[in-house]
Structure formats: structure tokens, C-alpha cells
């Protein structure tokens, strides 16, 4: 997802620019290694990008309806306080831009997205079948999102395809929400030094964004 652009905002961009040149060059080099370009590398679902792209579509279970509605509200820049009830308090959101830990940080990411892109459409939203190797507690979604900086524009600023892997608990709350552009795996500290460096960079970006983005969804603010 394009979240700064979305998550970074001018504040985090300023903070990054204030770092020593060597640090900026080093982290930029590491960032270019993310995500993994190998289509056979396993993504958050435990499958390869080629495998998840070829999964069949399925109908939702009754307990999944609320989660799917919440996801659609988040990615169309229309979150409300009720939207965030799909998450457990300690939930983690991980995408190519940031790692948000806890519901307050997640709210900041998606509220920031709605401010940057006041309009977002979902031309394609497919709930995917879980193969036997993927537990039923994981919800897999293939989606295309078209983001508009100008809500009245005739064409989007950017359309992004991604795989959403939603890991849920026994209460049917999302405990981990991973977004992977074009289904390609996001690396983490388990992938060695550059993975560790990028994970820390993403956490910093999410934390810094949370300092400036309101917890109140933009669609609920009163004039």
C-alpha cells in the first residue's frame, strides 16, 4: 500500500533528512532490498507469490463478514471508530512502508492514509481459498486499490495490487495484518542484517507518524 508516501509524511521525511548522510545512504541501500523479488519466496501466507495469485476465490464465513467490511473501510479511506474493532489491542500491521504495533499505531497509519488519499476505490477484492497448509485462522485477500490524491480526478494517482494476510485469534479478532505488494514477501529481522535494519526503519516510520496523526478518523471529524 502507498502509505507515505502515506506513513512517512513530511514530518518523518524531515526527520530522516536530518540524519547523517552515511546513515541515510545505508538505510536507503537496505530499503531497496525490500520486498523479496523472488516469486518463489514464501510470503506471510506461507505460500509463494505464484501460489497465492493462483488461489481460487471463496465465499466468506459468517464470522469473517465484520473483518472484511472493516478492511474495505480502511482501504477506501473511510475508517470509523467501529472499523478498528476488528483488531485485537496488541495487533500488528506490517506493510512495505511501516510496522505498526498496537491499535493506536494502526489507527495512525490508516487515518494518515485517509488524509493523504481522500478517495480510494477497490476495483478488485477476492477472498481466497486456504489450501490445506494454511490454517483457517488466516484470512487471505487479493485486492487492487486505486488511490486518488484528488478525489474528483478521472484517473487514480496509483493502483496497487497486494496480498493481505490476516491472522486471527479465537475471538475472531485480527492479531496480525500483513500487506505485501504484488504478493511478494516482506523481509524481517529473521532475514539477517538488512532485514533487521529495514524492520527497525519501518517501526521508526510508524512510531514517528503516530506522533502527528490524530486517533480520530478523518471521516468522523466535525467542521
Image: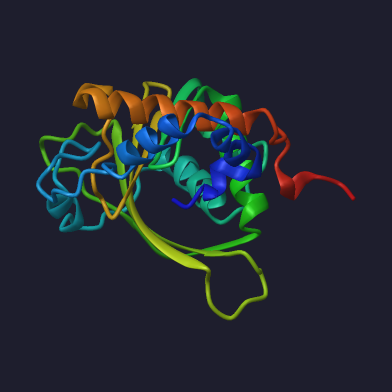
- Percent position (x, y) of residue 67? 46, 40
Which quarter of the picture shows residue 220? top right
Seen at 73% across and 47% down, the residue is 218
Q: Residue at x 38, y 42 (%)?
A: 96
Type of colouring: rainbow
Residue at point 13%, 48% (across, down): 38
The tally of labels here is 0
Image location of residue 192, percent across then percent down? 20, 23
What is the residue that sits farthest to the right in this orientation?
A: 223
Q: Is residue 39 left or right of residue 199?
A: left
Tell me residue 163's x, y (percent): 31, 49
Q: Residue furthest top?
A: 90
Relative horizontal placement of residue 131, taking residue 165 as reference (left or right): left
Q: Is residue 115 above or below residue 33?
A: below
Whether residue 172 is visible, yes or no, is no
53 or 126: nearer the eye? Answer: 53
Q: Quadrant of residue 41?
A: top left
Residue positioned 63% across, 53% down in the render: 116
In the image, farthest residue toward the bottom: 154
- The answer to whether 22 is drawn above or below residue 56 in the figure is above
Q: Nearer the viewer, residue 140 or 213?
A: 213
Q: Is residue 76 left or right of residue 203?
A: right
Q: Is residue 207 visible?
A: yes
Amino acid at each position: 500500500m502507498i502509505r507515505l508516501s502515506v506513513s512517512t509524511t513530511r514530518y518523518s521525511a524531515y526527520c530522516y533528512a536530518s540524519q547523517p548522510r552515511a546513515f541515510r545512504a545505508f538505510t536507503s541501500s537496505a530499503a531497496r532490498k525490500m520486498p523479496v523479488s523472488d516469486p518463489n519466496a514464501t510470503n506471510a501466507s506461507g505460500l509463494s507469490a505464484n501460489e497465492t495469485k493462483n488461489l481460487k476465490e471463496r465465499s466468506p464465513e459468517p464470522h469473517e463478514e465484520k473483518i472484511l467490511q472493516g478492511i474495505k473501510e480502511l482501504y477506501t479511506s473511510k475508517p470509523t471508530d467501529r472499523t478498528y474493532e476488528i483488531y485485537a489491542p496488541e495487533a500488528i500491521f506490517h506493510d512495505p512502508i511501516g510496522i505498526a504495533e498496537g491499535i493506536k499505531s494502526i489507527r495512525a497509519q490508516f487515518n494518515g492514509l485517509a488524509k493523504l488519499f481522500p478517495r480510494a476505490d477497490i476495483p478488485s477484492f477476492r477472498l481466497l481459498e486456504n489450501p490445506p497448509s494454511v490454517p483457517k485462522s488466516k484470512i487471505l485477500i487479493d485486492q487492487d486499490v486505486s488511490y486518488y490524491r484528488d478525489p474528483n480526478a478521472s484517473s487514480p494517482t496509483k493502483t496497487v495490487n497486494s496480498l493481505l494476510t490476516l491472522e486471527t485469534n479465537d475471538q475472531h479478532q485480527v492479531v496480525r495484518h500483513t500487506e505485501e505488494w504484488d504478493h511478494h514477501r516482506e523481509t524481517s529481522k529473521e532475514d539477517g542484517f538488512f532485514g533487521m535494519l529495514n524492520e527497525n526503519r519501518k517501526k521508526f516510520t510508524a512510531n514517528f507518524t503516530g506522533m502527528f496523526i490524530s486517533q480520530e478518523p478523518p471521516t468522523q471529524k466535525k467542521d
